[in-house]
Amino acid sequence: MPMEISTLSKQTVMLLSVCFLATSVFAQEKTITGTVTAAQEGPLPGVNVLVKGTTTGTVTDMEGAYRITVPDDADVLVFSSIGYTSQEVTIGNQTTIDVVLQEDVQALTEVVVVGYGTQERKEITSSVASVTPENFNKGNITDVAQLVQGKVAGLSVSRAGGDPNGGYAIRLRGLSSLGANTEPLVVIDGQIGADLNSVDPNDIQSIDILKDGSAAAIYGTRGSAGVILITTKTGTQGETQIDYSGYVSSEAPARLVDVMSASEFRDLGIGNDRGASTDWYDEITRTSLSHTHNLSLSGAAGSGTSYRASLNYRDIQGVAIETGFDRLNARLTLQQRAFDDKLSINLNVASTWSQQDLGWNDAFKYAAIYNPTAPVRTTDPLFNLAGGGYFEENFVDYANPVAVLRQNANEQLEKQTNIMASAEYEFIPGLRLLARYGQQAGNIYHTIYLPKNAFYLPTLEVTGRAFSGFARSGYAVKEDDESFDQLFESILTYETNISNIDLSALAGYSYQSFNNEGVEMAGGGFLTDKTSENLASARDFANGMGRVESYKDGSRLVGFFGRVNLNYENTYFLSASLRREGSTMFGENNKWGDFPALSVGVDLSQITDFPWVDNLKLRASYGVTGALPPDPYLSLQTLEAGTSLFYAGNDGYVSSFGPERNPNPNLRWERKKEFDIGLDFVLVDSRLTGTIDYYNRSTSDLIFEAQVPVPPNLVPTTWLNIGTLDSEGFEFALTYDAYRSTDFNWSTALNFTTYTIKLAELDSDEGSASIPPANLGTPGQEATQIARAEPGKEIGILWGLTFERIDEDGKFVFSDLNGDGAINTDDQSQVGQGLPDFEFGWNNTFTYKNFDLNFFIRGAIGHDLVNSYRAFYENPGVATSYNVVNTKYFNPNLDDAQIFSSLFVEDATFVEMDNATLGYTLPLSENSAFRNLRLYLAGQNLFMITDYTGPDPEVRFQDRSLQDGRYTNVVLTPGIDRRETWVWARTFTFGVNVGF
Amino acid sequence: MLPALVLLSCTDLDETELLYDEVTTDDFYQTEEELTSAIGDAYTLLFTFYQNNNMMPLNEVTSDEVVVPTRGADWGDGGHWVRLHQHTWTPQDSRITQGWEYFFNGVNTCNRLLAILEPIGTPEADAIIAELRSLRAIYYYWLMDLYGNVPISTDFSATEPPANNSRQEVYNFVEAELTENAPLLPKTGPAEEDTYGRVNYYTAQAALVKLYLNAEVYTGTPQWQKALDACEEIINSGLYNLTPAYRDNFTRDNKGSSEFIWAIPFDEVFAQGFHLPMITLHPESQKTYSMTSQPWNGFTTIQEFYESYIDPAQNPGPQGEVVGTSPDGSMTTGTLDERLSNFIVGPQFTADGDRLQDGGADPGDPDGPPITFTPYMNELQPSAWRQSGARIGKWEFYNGMGQFLSNDFAIFRYADILLSKAEARANLFGYGDAEALMLVNQIRERAGVEPFTALTPALLLAERGRELFAEVHRRVDQIRFGTFNGAWRFKDPDPSTHVNIFPIPETQINANPNLVQNPGYPGSGN
């Protein structure tokens, strides 16, 4: 049945319009006044006072006093404030209502966002972590993932080097899938599969992370790598609030690759002395200056409407010259209640525009290895090879890094619009039906131009080949990629109380369509660089050498789901859910899968009376989740036009059609089964809270592009469900209010993560697979294996010969492991482990009067990295072409070919001061125009403790490598520090937050 | 809420409705044009025939003609180029894996198309079936030549991974398929447009020549008479002649050359793949030919092979100034064989006539930055000088060329058939056979060198080398003449002859439990 989504969206819009026009009619009104105090502390300012079930409300002033005008028929006032238990008071005939609020055991009543709903913390029976803005990382934050880096036990967020446009690798509980998503599914305000960076960090209310299988199972085929739920801020009640926050930020390189200076290079006496002295890192980096501004507006506008609008602008300079981005993000949230609050309508619209100067990662490689005696510029025809005035020499994978960045353009314009509209109606108390429609439209427009006098020879992803602007007389690439995804969901929920049991249940239907299309064009032969934006001026398109490609694909996902939550006297808890989901991407014989989950919990503090214990919840859960194939059509036998044409006589060529892949009608979802047992506790008058989890998971039917025999197969690889990943892990998180007084408070939080992942097997009835090892790469080491994955072994094997010493002749001596007298591939063994033993984050917050100080330290312990810079260039012999890496391991007596071994695998254990902030909140007079005013100074990457000699010891969870002309993130071979890594940079930020 | 109820019934997950840029096999083969295009898929594979991952490394780099030296950081590639040259390859080496996949891709494509065509039953379809079966037999010929004991797979619908067949069985299969289908193929010459680049009757005969010529290697039983018959079938057709000049076969406009029995109709735009300039020329050579790409400085010739042209003792002929084999590439006196156009040697110049310069010249390079291609090479690895080695210039390199040449490539060439006939006669009637000598001298005369007065196996092999250099015949010729396991520059004698066939790739052995490794290789059991 073809879907009529366009009709649907029209209907939705019409429905919404009708609802916004509907206005409630108010009768007479009356005014109520009063004071709110806290049990021990006296008057309480900033308490929300709200007529229950409406958006009519106000807040208390500095003396805790309030004044509110309410309709005559208003029944109940709700008093709420963060840190206190909300209180409801029946109005009756009173005109003065004074209230005393009790301090809240926040850790228990905190609302946690879960899949398709919310629960109070005390009711949660699976492993869910929440991070709210006060705990976000501070400083120059350019990516949402950065907010929670190191903050959540089990969540690993890593980015090596300081590329402002480089994404973060995110892993929840390690690796649990080889399918489409090795990173957690992101859900923003109900929009499933959202782009993490379609929301600005300033608009986020909370980030909730569904860690175990039972919590994620409601997301079925996309839950295996975990789920990150982001809730954005909504309109506030009462008076309109205007907030501004802004900062300026400066970044400078702090850790580089140690290479020889010009004089050291000359003293070595091997390489060519080109007469100058150049510090290439100095030439390509800068002390950058970035600034960011956020303005938001929120409030309520009578008759049940509340809103929030925000505008966020970022102008970020990269630490490398000619790099950075400009981003403008706007978000509007509208809520409307009607029909005696039975109907609730929400509209959330966000738009992001981002202009990125990507630069070229190769510049960092070349800055390390470029001859330090070479000048940046030259007029000598022997070295002005491309005529651009830059010094160039003809060695493999070698170009003047300043010229690389200055001459060649690599820009991207990204646009995204997200719309989420929903309507919920309460038929009878507790029974609600929600319908929502979400749309995400994205566009990425990528432009590369290599000018006529540029020598740099990048391997372009679009062509899979290396070209230089000089060789191609100017070369331009244009890529335009559109993505469009629509979500429709309807969810029926019912909440009731049967004797001592609180019951909530939901049933839902979800339909999501995904469409992608795009165009790629590339060609050279420009008469002048001035017309580079007009591909028609490229000769290649006239003589047939230009390249044009387009594509379009689509997929659909249909799911039915249900869940029941039970709470027996706040002591025993149970949750059970099931999702049945089908995808077009599965093979004909396996379109549908079932994903059940069950979790139970008991609050032991309710059963026995422990001293010091406010809450002690033991919980256990089991859940099944899945993963989709990475691309559509992988199960189908299709034909595709080849790039070569067939000679059909008389100088005529016709396009030839050939098979795209081997079909697999049995292709099905990956199946992850996970068992989790956990303990949540709140102790010592709620001063110590924490959670401990142990989990054990097994992912079978891994979706893998397996090697198959030829014949009988047409091509040597088929997408099969093959193999099993087993992992187990242990996590804990603790928060302790170490010291509390009127003027001084100190709280500290620690989280700890450890896990092991084993590739249990790699076989199925349909075939077996071997995993291609990771090789060191070009130049010259294309077949030098440095990392691998093997069935029956843990993930993270770094592989090579074992280095013993360099002998008196300067030759490498390696261990002859098999004792056959020869050193060859049979003497290779595991020489490192790419994944850490454990990771931790340690946060401390101090407040003294109006000052606040926060610092956050994080680390990863026990992982190794292949230091590719050293593996290629730490050898005096390379000086004939390249500069020499000169770390503490450098041996000037080495006189041997560069052979990979354990010598180049280093312990990359690190502890770093990730960020620290010192803030001052100005005391404001009652009549001040400001609601609040805070100034702060923040630093990021303040210090790093490590023995690792490369720029950044961060864990490399995946290996980005170019395969078949496409960059692919290879997840089975972590632990390789490639040469494209940017330097490690330090950032200082000065910022201000103002509220009106 | 109405849309909710409507959508609740939508559970359609048919993916073929969402196909926009590919087509399912059910929706294809509907028109004659689509059918032609589908057959094209069996041939377009040949566009990568000569690339640095297929026939070229397997048949030339393993021989005494061509070598890929390691030049500093360049072309080290984990040593597999060196292993190819020194016959120490392993079942993991990528050239060996790719060769297998390449030719079986050809076999499987033919099988797939045959499965579609066989039920049709029209004369047109039957003609294409004969063509595809012959083409498949030729793909199998190469598989059998390279890997020996390969599985015979003719059924596209088979799903069980097949077991090895013996080399004899594959030989029999190739012979039967070619002899059965050849009579159904058109007897057209190289000037015939409709069959140019496709398998015709004489292509099948030429394939049989190769099969029979090497029959003793493949099966232990020589088939010289059958080889001679197949040669005569081609020669007596009168459709083929030696071109007046040797070079005519290798120019940019060589299409339809009277020596082409089967050619790959390359085109720098439509039929891309012939990237010889990229793999052999120096990066700076870009300026010699105003190329739109920068070459990779890889494949070169071995010094002694180059000497077999200029040394009057080996190759008698008119004497004159030629580039010598001293380290600086200075001129010397030697034989002026027209076929020296196979090499690019000596000082190099830009298109404007300036001396080509390499700022990164090796410290030991005798003449510094000016680039001179010297037949001399200082070492194979790790630091062969950047300018060393005679480059393969057999096919015309033209001004403004890109990565790919427009020159056509002859898979089977008439000169080879003449030399093959000479060899068959010499084996049937002795090396004193007058016609055999006459045939070889026919080739020599065209090259402008003096005729031989008598023929020996060594002379015949050397003449095949000079004439057919870099046309991917050398490995099989050396095996047949018994020199493949010997020593030459940068290569020691082979300890065993098991290297005369390549190992079955490890990826295939791992994926297919029914396959047995070839003798002498790890995992073969012997």
Image (cartoon, coloured by chain):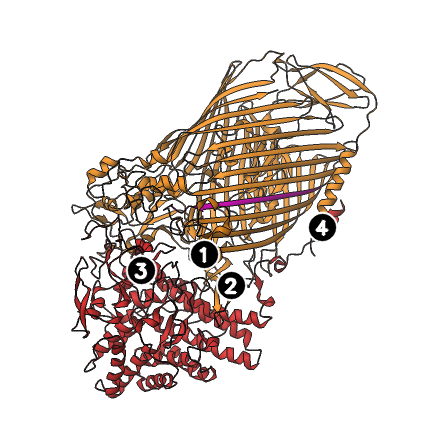
Q: Which residue is mark 1?
A: A762
Colour red maps to chain: B
Q: Give the mark nearer the N terminus: 4 vs 3.
A: 4
In space, the residues marked 4 and 1 are separated at their CA atoms by 40 Å
Residue A705 place in picture, x, y as percent: 48, 57
Give the left or right position of residue A477, taking residue B469 as reference. right
Give the left or right position of residue A365, taking residue B134 as reference. left
Colour orange maps to chain: A
In space, the residues marked 2 and 3 are separated at their CA atoms by 35 Å
Residue type of the residue flagged with mark 1: Leu
Residue A169 place in picture, x, y as percent: 47, 41
Q: Are marks 4 and 3 in contact (CB under 8 Å)?
A: no
Q: Which residue is mark 3?
A: B280
Tell me if I can see residue B71 in this picture: yes
In space, the residues marked 1 and 2 are separated at their CA atoms by 19 Å
Which mark is on residue B7? 4
Q: Secondary structure at mark 4?
A: helix
Specify whether disc 4 shares its chain with disc 2.
no
Give the left or right position of residue B278, taking residue A312 as reference. left
Residue A211 place in picture, x, y as percent: 54, 40
Q: Nearer the viewer, mark 1 or mark 2?
A: 2
Chain letter behind tag 1: A
Residue range (magenta): A435-453
Q: Which residue is mark 2?
A: A662
Residue type of the residue flagged with mark 3: Thr
Specify whether disc 1 shares its chain with disc 3.
no
Q: Are marks 4 and 1 in contact (CB under 8 Å)?
A: no
Are there few (<14), some (14-19), or many (20+) residues within 10 Å of tag 2?
A: some
